[in-house]
Amino acid sequence: MFRKLSIAAAVFMLVLTAGFADAQTSVTTTVTVNIPEVLRFEVSGSADFVLDPTSFDGGATSVVVDASTTPTVSVTANRNWQLSVQADAANWSYSGAHAVQSPTKDAADLAVGLTGPGSWAIAHGVASKWALGTSSEPLATGGRGRTSGAIAYSLTHNLADWPGDYSLSVTYTLAGN
């Protein structure tokens, strides 16, 4: 009898094991993700100008000088973008010994252009700089990725400019398009 129980138990275990081997369960789940828009840029560095008083020795009353240093603009985006520029005021701010004369210098005396990788469509390059105004002007468009370019400035200064320090705030805007 002990032997019959053993055989019966073995058969029961075999049947039970076979039932588990054939059983299968599936679960389907959906994974979702919301990828955020990446549209970032930074401008690093500054434009420096070296103005030489002897530039006027040849009789010129107005001289255009390119900046001796160029800031870098870096764009990081996962969509198409457009970079625009504008002056924040119609005239430069003045500080110096001649403030009583209320010197004015037009924002358009500063022209801006851009160099960048071949993936950028540049509207105003080094040879076709745009004279700044208070209206936004597109400089370049591009697509997805991380790329960098250089901002090129030219300054017109003339004998009508009073000696002193001038400053002009310039705003760059990166927008998706």
Image (cartoon, rainbow, N blue to C red):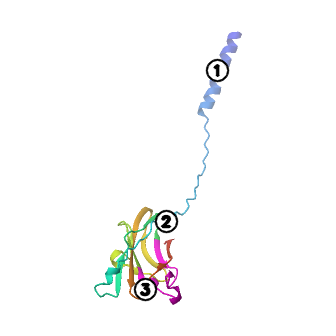
Residue 100 lies left or right of residue 46; in this view the side is right
Work out whether 75 lies above or below 138.
above
Q: Disc 2 to disc 3, how far (Cα)?
A: 34 Å
Q: Residue under label 3, please give it.
A: 161
Q: x and y percent of residue 47 in the render?
A: 42, 71
For badge 1, the amino acid type reads Val
Q: Disc 1 to disc 3, how far (Cα)?
A: 107 Å
Tell which circle, 1 or 3, labels the residue nearer the N-terminal end: 1
91 drawn magenta = yes
Q: Which residues are magenta?
A: 82-110
Q: Residue under label 1, please give it.
A: 11
For badge 3, the amino acid type reads Asp
- Which residue is found at the position 60% from the left and 43% from the top? 26
Work out whether 141 lies above or below 10.
below
Which mark is on residue 109?
none
105 drawn magenta = yes
Crowding around mark 1 (Cα neighbors within 10 Å: few <14, some 14 to 19, many 20+) is few
Pick the front one: 74 or 99: 99
Residue 81 shows up from this direction? yes
Single out the mark in the foreground, 2 or 3: 3
Q: Residue under label 2, please give it.
A: 41
Tell which circle, 2 or 3, labels the residue nearer the N-terminal end: 2
